[in-house]
Amino acid sequence: MRLDPGNYQFRSRASVFFTMGQYDRGRAFLRLDAGSEWSNNVEVHALREGKMQEALGQLHRIPDSAFFHSRALAACYSSPRPSDAEQLLDQAEKDVLVFHDPEPRYSFAVHYNACRGNAFTARLAKSAIRKRILRVREFAVRCVAYRISEVA
């Protein structure tokens, strides 16, 4: 980052640091692309820190995203859930299954586990593995990092 501090493409490194629980360091990479749809939606990693109200506030402030499904994620963590929560969550799952990139499938599995459960997490993970998108070992390591149990 020191060699090219303005290169927004380094932003994806934030995910690595969030996975390791180093949230401040991850946010340093997000600031390279501050205000973008990507960085605004990735910032909801506050959910993983247990900062539910902060994350929900962030989700409500940003526009809904066809890629990130911000409204569905907000519905997942809202209490009480909005009346259209199931419809939003079902649509988000259908949409993510279209992606060939493993990261959205993996991220959805992690973020939506709280409201969709382990069967949902396993379904997304298995779909990625079946298509040889995500290596089994990589997924297992990530599950341990996110403390997801019994995904299969």
Image (cartoon, rainbow, N blue to C red):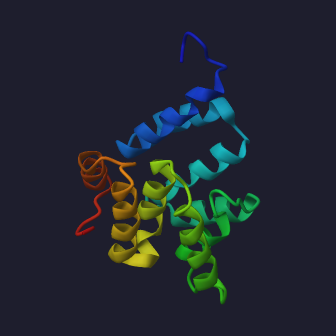
Q: Nearer the viewer, residue 134 or 69?
A: 134
Picture residue at 53% right of the left edge, 35% below the top: 12
Picture residue at 54% right of the left edge, 38% below the top: 27
Quarter of the image with the C terminus in it: bottom left
Q: Residue furthest front?
A: 131
Q: Horizontal placement of 29 versus 38: left or right? A: left
What x and y, as percent, mark residue 107?
47, 56
Q: Residue furthest right?
A: 63
Q: Horizontal placement of 63 versus 118: left or right? A: right
Please, is residue 148 above or below residue 115 in the view? above
Picture residue at 63% right of the left edge, 77% below the top: 88
Q: Horizontal placement of 61 versus 134: left or right? A: right
Please, is residue 97 above or below residue 140 in the view? below
Q: Quadrant of residue 36?
A: top right
Q: Quadrant of residue 79?
A: bottom right
Q: Nearer the viewer, residue 56 or 149?
A: 149
Q: Residue furthest top?
A: 3
Q: Nearer the viewer, residue 142 or 56?
A: 142
What x and y, as percent, mark residue 133?
40, 48
Q: Quadrant of residue 131?
A: bottom left
Please, is residue 35 above or below residue 122 in the view? above
Number of numbered discs visible in the structure rendering: 0
What x and y, as percent, mark residue 32?
64, 29
What x and y, as percent, mark residue 45?
50, 53
